[in-house]
Image (spheres, grey):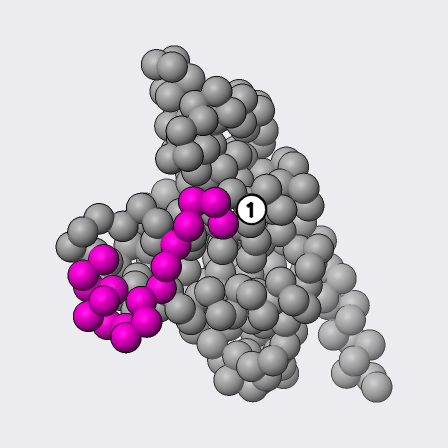
Amino acid sequence: MYFSVVLSQDFSRIDNQINNKNFRDAQLMLSDLNVEFPKNIDILTRLSIVHHFISESAKSNSSEQKNSSKAFEYINDAYNIDPNNPKVLKWYVISLGKTVENKSIRKQIEESKNIEKISLAVIKDLPHDEYCYNILGQWHYRLADLNGPSRRIASFLFSDPPEGSFEKAKFFLEQSIKINPEYIGTYYWLGKTYIKLGDTKKANELFRKGIVLERPFKREEEIFVKMNNFLKNN
């Protein structure tokens, strides 16, 4: 009981640091706790979260890759302890997606069914969390947008290759926006999806809404530039 109370107080301070984007401070506090309380799912999950956000705010590619790898390492440890915990699964699929996004198209396709399976499980248990709706929207977009050679790789890897759909991408991304209408990235991916569906007017509308939203990390800055360039040329 004592340990539970102590950890609860520590988590309150750590979560406050995370909410205020003081990720390095949170990471140091969590690292100390991880030594004292090893194999604690709540500590491991939070370590994954802070390393994920440190990677998102990294100035160099090497720091980004190092911290995204650490994020996956910690959440994989939590996953091995409790593979049915929905919060663990949520951050597992977020970290997995981040670690494979810059790898070969073969590696991305190999992980695609796993990402879909876990995302659907998280949505079932956490129906009001926007993250996995967003991930599934991107998943469907990327698969629907595969070129011929990439589709042949998918056919080679799977007897039943994963199939993406722009219509399903639209559905999941729209669900994500309903839950959280303040994230620029969802407007970007939904706008791209509408372009693929032939509705440039709707894409323009979404991009105009998106470019006024907060851009906390490098990824969002890059998205802002792409949306802004599209609006200037259309």
The correct choice, above or below, for 30 with respect to 130 in the image is below
Where disc 1 sits, the SS reads helix
The image quarter containing residue 154 is bottom left
| Quarter of the N terminus within the rendering | bottom right
Viewer-closest of 229 and 177: 177
Image side of residue 201 versus residue 19, left or right: left
Q: Is residue 46 in sight in this rendering? A: no
Residue 163, magenta (yes or no): yes
Which residue in the protein does label 1 denote? 171
Magenta stretch in the rendered image:
151-168
Viewer-closest of 91 and 26: 91
Image side of residue 37 versus residue 211, left or right: right
Q: Amino acid at mark 1?
A: Phe
Residue at image coords 51%, 70%: 118
Viewer-closest of 195 and 87: 195
- Residue 170's spot in the image, x, y percent? 51, 43
Residue at image coords 56%, 81%: 83
- Residue 163's spot in the image, x, y percent? 37, 59
Q: Is residue 134 in sight in this rendering? A: yes
Residue 64, magenta (yes or no): no
The image quarter containing residue 78 is bottom right
Q: Residues within 10 Å of mark 1 (few under 14, many from 20)?
A: some
